[in-house]
Amino acid sequence: MAKLLVLYDSQTGNTEKMAKAVAEGARSVPGVDVELKYYAGSEELAEAAAIVFGAPTYYHDITLPIKQMLEEAAKAGVQLKGKIGAAVGSYGWSGEAPQNALEILKNKFGMKAIEPPITALYEPKQTQLEECRKLGKRIAQEIVGK
Ligand SMILES: Cc1cc2nc3c(=O)[nH]c(=O)nc-3n(C[C@H](O)[C@H](O)[C@H](O)COP(=O)(O)O)c2cc1C
């Protein structure tokens, strides 16, 4: 069964709400295995048909757990070329993290990025959570059967 990983970091729960909404949208599509968690090892990343990162902005960048996960995958030579990558994230004033995550997914791993990322100023509004659900659903529809 096609697998969609939703991997997120969230210190005050804002990005977590967005990541959960992505997973919820994806789960509305039968035939896709959706996993929502903080971390996936290289083997699991390699098995996924699509990966969505929930990346809050801290100090103008993605946070350490996400960086480490990507670094491990790069070191292990995980092949993600052509797979779908997306990013969502909450921010307070500059909001670079989701786009920074996408740049890595595109440039380092050759993933097919869905742009622009979905961002929310602090707590996501209902409309933004709905966008996240739609993103999850759209990705699940693209990978079902893969
Ligand atoms: C120590 C610290 C540093 C932060 N740095 C940034 C930043 O550089 N740019 C920005 O847009 N928001 C920044 N923020 C705001 C967070 O991105 C914002 O609070 C966001 O809602 C956190 O999401 P989370 O609840 O998923 O962790 C910072 C917050 C803290 C506490």
Image: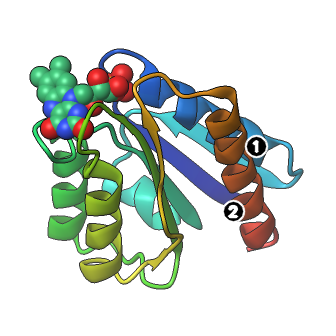
Q: What element carries label 1?
A: helix
Q: Which residue is drawn at 42% across and 83% down?
A: 81
Where residue 133 appears, x then y in whole percent? 72, 43
- State how many labels appear: 2
> Looking at the image, which residue sits at the far left?
59
Would residue 90 appear left or right of 62 to someone viewing this image?
right
Q: Which of marks 1 and 2 is nearer the N terminus?
A: 1
Q: Residue at x 69, y 36 (%)?
A: 127
- Please identify the quarter of the rendering in which residue 125 is found: top right
Would residue 20 appear left or right of 6 to someone viewing this image?
right
Q: Do the residues labelled 1 and 2 touch (CB within 8 Å)?
A: no
Q: Say which quadrant the C terminus sits in.
A: bottom right
Q: In this view, does 98 lie above or below 80?
A: above
> Looking at the image, which residue sits at the far front?
93
Q: Which residue is drawn at 52% across and 76% down?
A: 83
Q: Which residue is drawn at 38% across and 45% down?
A: 40
Residue type beneath disc 2: Ile
Asked if one can make out residue 77 in the rendered structure from this viewpoint, the answer is: yes
Please state the quadrant of the image where ligand 1 appears: top left
Q: What element carries label 2?
A: helix
Asked if one can make out residue 10 in the rendered structure from this viewpoint, the answer is: no
The residue tagged 2 is 139
